[in-house]
Amino acid sequence: MARYSCESQSVALITLTNPPVNALSYAVRQGILAGLRKASADPAVKSVVLCGANGKFCAGAEISEFNSDPTRRLPMLVDIINLMEKSDKPVVAAIEGVALGGGLEVALGCHYRIAQCQAKVGLPEVTLGILPGAGGTQRLPRLVGVNAALDIITSGRHMLASEALKLGIVDEIVDSNTVEAAIALAKKAEGLPIGPRRICSKTVQCPDNLEAILDEATKKIKKQARGALSPLVCIQAVRMATQLPFSEGMKKERELFNTLVTSGQASALRYAFFAQRAVEKWTTPSGNWKTAVALPIHTAAVIGLGTMGRGITVSLVKAGIPVIALEDNQRQLDIGKKAVEALLGQVAQKLEPPENKNDSNLLSRVKYTLNFAELRDVDLVIEAVFEDMMLKKGVFRKLTAVCKPEAFLCTNTSGLDVDQIASVTTRPERVIGTHFFAPAHVMKLLEVVRGHRTSPQTIGTVMKLAKALNKIGVVVGNCPGFVGNRMLAPYSENACFLLEEGSQPEEVDRVLEEFGFAMGLFRVIDLSGLDVGWRSRREKGLTGPELPPGTPPRSRNGKRYCPIPDLLVENGRLGQKTGKGWYQYVKPGGRVSSPDPWIQDFLKSYRLTHNIKTRYIDQDEIIERCLYPLINEGFKILEEDIAAGPEDIDIIYIYGYGWPKHTGGPMYYAWTVGLPKVLSKLEKYSEAYPDVPSMKPSNLLRKLVSNGSPSPSQWRTVTRPSNSKL
């Protein structure tokens, strides 16, 4: 709803009240409209102030209403904004907290805008697969120009009030008492001409190189948001603002909005929006997000200052948590310290407001040591040493001896058995896996791995910490590779089989990138290093000197095996770090790749050696053989209850593995493709490649198809296993 009151003899105050963020629900829209009409009809009212309750202006549309009864969409927000803008009484927006999406569009319809200095504004509709549909694409270019409008609308980014002031989005910023300042501004505006304050009456200032600007924006979007429709349509809408009168541009905006809002991509992005919120509500047999009492973390320790440890340390410091960073020798400690300080220097430069850009404030939060005894009083420890079970167990034995009994002990592992690590401690209920993703101070995902005896309080505390670190925590069960890396294995395996049969790395990557991945699989492997996977395979006995003599080169335990990645490592091709991997680079450590003739010759020789008849493999088969086994593994994970639902898997893959968000994630994508089709293709490939177990369809997939392929929200009701890992 929206509350109407008169704060002085001449100023009416309309307060949006829809906790927690004053979303523009049906009731709120009705309330705004009623308030505007009441103010217009009251001769004593000379001006209006629009604000939000509880220190938040408005975070935009009520997304749950997108699929609602059309009659619930009236009054339309666009009509309310137009009415407000046409008012002959000045309307002032008092922006506190956030003015996002429809909230900013409402503010743009006001004649004046005043913001509290910490408020954020933006038009994030593009992240939901739509565009600002209440005048945002038509008013913003008229207010700030084409360049700024394109950046704001196509990125969906949020900006602080200080930037909004520089751009002209707001007229004034204040430190506090925003509503009082808005009332004072409203009184000053009484009697002043309103016409010049109506954005709709302005014309877009078109630069001479307008077409070049629009073309460059299109190229940028196609590169950065591969396959995403809404950013490109946003550019079309901004183009309309430069070519058409306001009223005609608004009609085009509405047409484009209606096209997008009913698209498959918008549906997928709305699913992802709600999935991200659903994963916060974790449940285990012994407790859940409601009942677990999370403890505050005042101090933390990080053990190991390699790549992951450095990023984790920076994440904690950014969250305001003092850190004790420990290494096992002075040289590694010095190297780690230098790297952490460099990262913190970069972080400091990005902080707002400018007075926070003081490196020393951040650097003072980290203490470096070689002594485990200094960890005795920390609330939480994150172990980030090398991925070796014996090494990690040794660390946890020491932690058990020195840390206070109530301290939480976390292991940053990408797939080792959390229960084994916990077994060497006297407090397994306080041990939990925290799988960060590299770079840890940038990547949003945190796999929170529950061991057999991990307590609900431990889970709750780490999930709360994830939020403090600005990460998305997803609770998963304990199994080799957990969720993300377990699904990655069949993806990588089958991509390599394609190379054996005739594909080139760049061909596979091109298809995956056209699908929407920012980087194809082989580019990603070059980035992380081919030696990472090689070490894992060696530890499993799949390659290396301990492989039994006479082992067939392309078979392991009766299953198909591709030794090509092992052979590349043996040839010193480790990826970007050596300048050669699946691709070649100008120099070691370089980022610009090109296809390597050596790889082509090597693959040709390999196929001849193993008498493999090559063939042309089209893009459909590449997608099916790379992604369907990954999806199939996801169904097995659900069947075993390693993940609570498809939403958990989809969020893990969107935020941890670069799965294109506009497809909703792997499990949602499978549903949109059609579960019967996925099943049929897996059956086809399983028959063709009986020695590839990842192609054998999961029982859950078969069960879902036999149950009519219900939507992902209903999958968990189809089966609930007795051998739950959650």
Image (cartoon, helix red, strand yellow):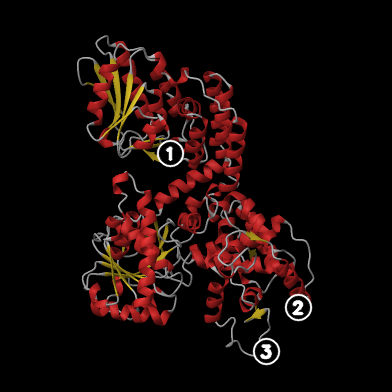
Q: Nearer the viewer, residue 214 or 276?
A: 214
Q: Say which residue appears at 59% left-offset and 61% top-offset.
A: 702
Judged from the image, the secondary structure of the residue bearing numbered disc 3 is loop
- The image shows residue 531, relative to residue 362, as above or below, that is below
User: With 172 as the anchor, is 144 left or right in this view?
Assistant: right
Which numbered tag is attached to residue 73? none
Indicate which disc, 2 or 1, sits on the residue closer to the N terminus. Answer: 1
Disc 3 packing (10 Å; few <14; some 14–19; many ≥20): few
Badge count: 3
Please name the residue that numbered disc 3 is placed on.
550
In percent of width and height, residue 457 lies at: 27, 63
Q: Residue furthest bottom?
A: 549
In percent of width and height, residue 299 lies at: 25, 64
Q: Amino acid at mark 2?
A: His
The picture quadrant where one finds residue 179 is: top left
In percent of width and height, residue 591 lies at: 57, 60
Please name the residue that numbered disc 1 is placed on.
64
Please name the residue that numbered disc 2 is placed on.
610
The CA distance from mark 2 to mark 3 is 15 Å
The CA distance from mark 2 to mark 1 is 56 Å
Judged from the image, the secondary structure of the residue bearing numbered disc 2 is loop
Indicate which disc, 1 or 3, sits on the residue closer to the N terminus. Answer: 1
